[in-house]
Amino acid sequence: MNNIILVGMPGSGKSTLGIILARRLGYGYLDTDSFISQREKSTLQGIIDTKGLAYFLETESQVGSEIVCDRVIIATGGSMILSEEAMNNLCSLGKVIYIDVPLDELKKRLGNYADRGVACSENQTLEDILKERQPLYEKYSDIKVTYKIGSSLEETADDILKKL
């Protein structure tokens, strides 16, 4: 294992799982959403609101395509998957793990996602976003871990480590 890249929908637990896995494996940790927020000195929603969705997606693509690291858990933003350039780079860095969480569970976790920095057009529902992105998560992932209703993030991390 070189690097581990976590992909999945917003609210799938990538950031928390990334921290858990980094701690367990003694790896570094990079959350691309946090990196973008720090670089832009704004929240994700603030970037989308002030500079537009296209700017945000281009920034995210650029960040994903420029990552070079070793022994790092990378938690990507949910929309990173939309960038072929970023995903080709990330796939070259290590194992890509798709955290698959059912739509009903995502709805519970996200609530009103309109102000959460979810990269989507104004009229897109969470179901629309999932339909658009799920084939890409499947395409780019080496391993798929399906969230089991009622399991903890620690148990999901156990599942990931078993599959690695």
Image (cartoon, rainbow, N blue to C red):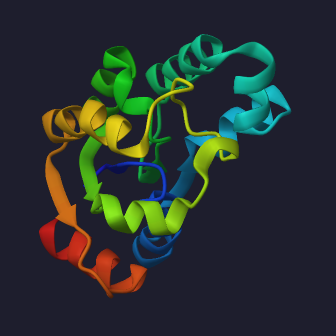
Taking 101 as reference, is 83 left or right?
right
For residue 13, say whether it is visible. no
Taking 156 as reference, is 141 left or right?
left
- Relative to 15, residue 3 above or below: above
Total tally of numbered discs in the picture: 0
Give the residue displayed 70% in from the left and 25% down from the top.
48
For residue 102, say whether it is visible. yes
Of 88 and 43, nearer the camera is: 43
Q: Quadrant of the N terminus?
A: bottom left
Of 4 and 16, nearer the camera is: 16
Of 9 and 145, nearer the camera is: 9
Give the residue displayed 35% in from the left and 31% down from the top.
81
Give the residue furthest to the front.
123
Q: Looking at the picture, how far across and down is residue 42, in whole percent? A: 83, 34
- Relative to 146, residue 48 above or below: above
Q: Quadrant of the C terminus?
A: bottom left
Give the residue displayed 66% in from the left and 47% down from the top.
116
Q: Looking at the picture, how far across and down is residue 52, in whole percent? A: 69, 15
- Relative to 59, residue 24 above or below: below
Taking 24 as reference, is 121 left or right?
right
Give the residue displayed 31% in from the left and 77% down from the top.
156
Looking at the rendering, which quadrant does residue 39 occupy?
top right
Q: Looking at the picture, how far across and down is residue 61, in whole percent? A: 49, 19
